[in-house]
Image (tube, coloured by chain):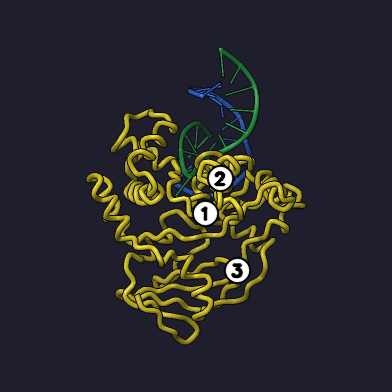
Chain colours: A yellow, B green, C blue
DNA sequence: GGGCAGGTCCGCA
DNA sequence: TGCGGACCTGCC
């Protein structure tokens, strides 16, 4: 891959394993939206950027070289060779081979810990369009105004300090529902220094999971999402309804407990379980594998 | 209109 | 420990 400076942006030439729909629609993030021209615009770390792909080149607009190196290179996990991971997984069995082929351009974004915590608290028993709406409402109301980009206004994700002294009634936006009280509790725990959200990545997966589950609204699934999507815990294996379905469809008997599925996944996928989960999730959800007919 | 959605919490054996 | 039911809310 070659990095080239451009007017108001940069170009990545000869990028491998980088498909915009795979990255932004595999369920790991909620603040990226597809534009009419097929490009994606999103907000992360208080910045707005737009990505467009032509051939094997990716164009990132509204940034500059130093910012790209500081923020986006890591955010898009560009130091990692996904070819190695995909090969390892595809060699396991036909299901993994098909999943990896289907989502071949997935990359795991290195997201902000706090934003990921709140986003996945909101995700519990919710729908993706609703989750996106809720996060957008929180940002518009309690985030900072970033600026206008291509005719739309953008806001950063609110800091914990902006939420901790709110009343539950203040954040009853569409899609928040019963999760409002969890969000405020989380903001309090972080602001008051009871849980060092940005220090958890230095702990082991098991220790970080225990700490994360101290947040109300955070159970095993949400904690694994937070660890994998923002704390480099590649052995985390979040089991949601789709992963449960695809695991039951291909690997374990129907009705297997989540704990047993978790154990099965750990022994099968080991320290790259998170990646396996993401390819399986995208595969299952896009193809609606295992979903019962109504 | 009842059921369901990227689960978690709570009460009960 | 492990299980079933409740849960905001919008959409089918």
Q: Is residue A293 visible?
A: no
Q: Is residue A219 left or right of residue A59?
A: right
Q: Cα distance, mark 3 to mark 1?
A: 19 Å
Task: Give whichever of A142, A74 is nearer the camera.
Answer: A74
**Earlier sequence position, callout 1 versus callout 2:** 2
Q: Is residue A91 left or right of residue B1?
A: left
Labels 1 & 2 near each other (Cβ < 8 A): yes
Q: Is residue A6 visible?
A: yes
**Location of the C terminus of chain A (image quadrant):** top left
Disc 1, SS: loop
Q: Cα distance, mark 3 to mark 2?
A: 26 Å
Asked if badge 1 and badge 2 are on a common chain, one would say yes
Q: Is residue A92 left or right of residue A29?
A: left
Disc 3, SS: loop
Q: Give me the chain letter of mark 2.
A: A
Question: Which residue is situated farthest in the bottom direction here?
Answer: A7
At 61% from the left edge and 41% from the top edge, which residue is drawn? A217
Labels 3 & 2 near each other (Cβ < 8 A): no
Q: Position of residue A175 (x, y in %)?
A: 59, 49
Q: Which residue position holds label 1?
A: A231
Instruction: Check disc 1: other Cα within 10 Å, few if <14, some if 14-19, many if 20+.
Output: many
Disc 2, SS: helix
Q: Give me the chain letter of mark 3.
A: A
Q: Cα distance, mark 1 to mark 2?
A: 9 Å
Q: Position of residue A147 (x, y in %)?
A: 62, 75
At 53% from the left edge and 44% from the top edge, which residue is drawn? A222
At 76% from the left edge and 49% from the top edge, which residue is drawn? A167
Q: Give me the chain letter of mark 1.
A: A
Q: Which residue position holds label 2?
A: A208
């Amino acid at each position: 891959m070659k990095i080239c400076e451009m007017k108001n942006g940069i170009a990545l030439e000869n990028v491998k394993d980088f498909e915009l729909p795979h990255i932004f629609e595999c369920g790991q993030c909620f603040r990226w939206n597809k534009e009419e021209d097929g490009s994606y615009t999103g907000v992360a770390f208080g910045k707005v950027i737009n990505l467009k792909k032509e051939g094997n080149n990716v164009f990132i607009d509204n940034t500059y070289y130093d910012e790209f190196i500081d923020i986006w290179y890591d955010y898009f996990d560009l130091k990692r060779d996904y070819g190695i991971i995909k090969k390892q997984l595809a060699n396991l069995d036909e299901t993994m081979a098909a999943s990896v082929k289907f989502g071949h351009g997935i990359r795991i974004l290195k997201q902000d810990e706090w934003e990921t915590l709140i986003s996945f608290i909101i995700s519990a028993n919710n729908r993706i369009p609703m989750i996106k709406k809720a996060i957008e409402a929180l940002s518009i109301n309690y985030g900072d105004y970033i600026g206008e980009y291509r005719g739309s206004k953008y806001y950063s994700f609110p800091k914990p300090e902006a939420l901790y002294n709110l009343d539950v009634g203040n954040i009853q936006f569409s899609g928040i529902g019963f999760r409002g009280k969890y969000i405020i509790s989380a903001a309090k725990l972080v602001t008051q220094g009871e849980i060092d959200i940005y220090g958890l990545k230095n702990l082991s997966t098991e220790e970080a999971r225990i700490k994360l589950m101290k947040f109300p609204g955070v159970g095993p699934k949400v904690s694994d999402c937070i660890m994998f999507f923002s704390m480099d815990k590649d052995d985390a294996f979040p089991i949601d309804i789709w992963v449960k379905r695809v695991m039951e469809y291909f690997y374990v008997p129907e009705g297997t407990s989540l704990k047993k599925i978790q154990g099965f996944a750990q022994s099968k996928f080991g320290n790259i379980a998170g990646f396996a989960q993401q390819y399986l999730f995208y595969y299952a959800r896009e193809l609606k594998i295992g979903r019962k007919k109504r």
